[in-house]
Image (spheres, grey):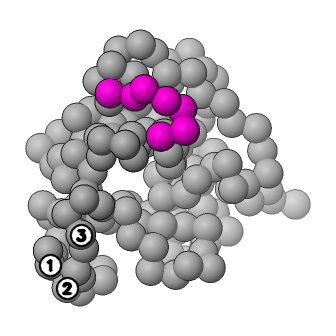
Amino acid sequence: MNINTVRFGEISIEENRIFNFVMPIIGFDKLTKFVILEPNKDSLFKWLQSVEDPALAFPIISVSSLAFDYTIDLQDNVVDALGIKSAENVLVMNITSIPQDDPKGTTINLLAPLIFNIENQTAGQVVLSGSGYDISYPMFKTV
């Protein structure tokens, strides 16, 4: 299947790579189909591209690839909604904000991670209430 994107132009993706967001991304309730793109294999960052809106793509990162502790506990309703049967089938990613004029000012949304069930291609954004995590956690320490 081909999709048009503003950032990457026309790309070809396999339909089995499309995630159905049964728990929508906050502020984007009407968009439910997204694909994870990895245009640069050497980068920590990937892109979450909307299949339905060519202009919408979020830079995302797996916090597990960084050197700090990040543990989440999913509520039963989230596990049920995403049909999670095994932790091995779960991918956790976080939306980042990368200032164009200051990449060192990049922040990570730790409060509301994206949870992907790679077994059944469902996903959702989950707010970790009471976790103490920040919505704009600095990726780089300032000296």
Q: Indicate whether 113 appears above or below 71.
A: below
Residue matched to label 3: 14
**Does label 3 or label 1 sit earlier along the sequence?**
1
**Does label 1 or label 2 sit earlier along the sequence?**
1
- Depth check: give the residue in front, 64 or 80: 80
Q: Is residue 65 left or right of residue 17?
A: right
Residue matched to label 1: 2
Going by the picture, which residue comes out furthest to the bottom? 9
- Image quarter of residue 52: bottom left
What stretch of residues is rendered in magenta?
Answer: 83-89
Going by the picture, which residue comes out furthest to the right? 143
Residue shown at the point (39%, 70%) measured from the top left: 37
- The magenta stretch spans residue 142: no
Residue shown at the point (78%, 44%) measured from the top left: 68
Placement of the C terminus among the 4 image quadrants: bottom right
Q: For the residues carrying marks 3 and 2, which lies nearer the camera in this image? A: 3
Residue shown at the point (67%, 68%) measured from the top left: 104
- Is the Cβ of the residue at disc 1 closer than 8 Å to that at disc 2? yes
Q: Indicate whether 127 appears above or below 104.
A: above
Q: Looking at numbered disc 2 in the image, what kind of residue is underneath it?
A: Glu
Disc 1 secondary structure class: strand
Residue matched to label 2: 10
The answer to whether residue 135 shows anywhere in this view is no
